[in-house]
Amino acid sequence: MKLEHIAITVSKPADIKDFYLDILGMKEVKNFVLNKVLANKIFSINKETSVCLLQKDDISLEMFILPGQSKRSFEHICLTVKDREKLVENSLKQNYECIRIERDLFDLVFIKDKSGNVFEIKESQVSR
């Protein structure tokens, strides 16, 4: 089994460039519009919706742009990166919310984009 993509919603197109391209270093692969008939049949959202497909390494994100979308939940995406502290530093410089929970074994780090999507950030372990 292979994970094909993760679909999430952002409230502004600028969020894609500001966070996903500039902070996470993803690349824009494709743009398309989900027509309102399909959006309604699949998601019960009767609105034509712009979608942007992003990719980096083996991760693909399908970004649905839905202005005004706001949600609270436990949904999050966990990413492993080579230099977690640099990613946190860059995120803070760009005014993204970073949550660090200090623990004995290792700190938990979460970053929120401007649409409220939550990313858990782990440091990749170096193989010896």
Image (cartoon, rainbow, N blue to C red):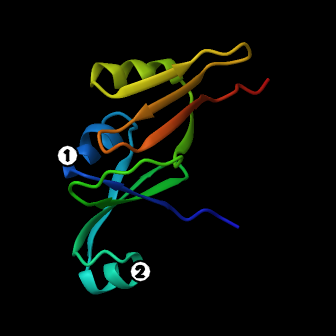
Quarter where residue 18 is shown = top left
Considering only order in the chain, which callout, 2 or 1, is on the residue closer to the N terminus?
1
Residue sitting at x 27%, y 71%? 32
Spatial CA distance of label 1 from label 2 is 26 Å
Residue drawn where x is 25% and y is 81% of the image = 36
- Residue 33 in percent (x, y) is at 25, 73
Contact (Cβ within 8 Å) of mark 1 with mark 2: no
Please state which amino acid type lies under the numbered disc 2.
Ile
Q: In the image, is 88 to the left or to the right of 67? A: right
**Front-lying residue, 118 or 54:** 118
Q: Which mark is residue 69?
A: none
Residue at coordinates 40% horizontally, 37% vertically from top-left? 24
Mark 1 residue crowding within 10 angstroms, few (<14) / some (14–19) / many (20+): few
Left of 63 or right of it: where is 123?
Answer: right
The amino acid pointed to by label 1 is Ala
Give SS at disc 2: helix
Considering depth in this image, is 53 or 111 the residue closer to the camera? 111
Residue 113: percent from the left, percent from the top? 35, 38
Q: Along the horizontal axis of the image, is 24 left or right of 101?
A: left
Residue tagged by mark 2? Answer: 42
Of badges 1 and 2, nearer the viewer stands: 2
Q: Residue 22, relative to residue 94: is it above or below?
A: below
For label 2, the crowd category at 10 Å Cα-Cα, with few meaning under 14, some 14 to 19 and many 20 or more, is few
Check the image and report above or below for 98 versus 27: above
Q: Which residue is mark 1?
A: 14
Label 1 residue SS: helix
- Could you tell me which quadrant the C terminus lies in? top right
Q: Quadrant of the N terminus?
A: bottom right
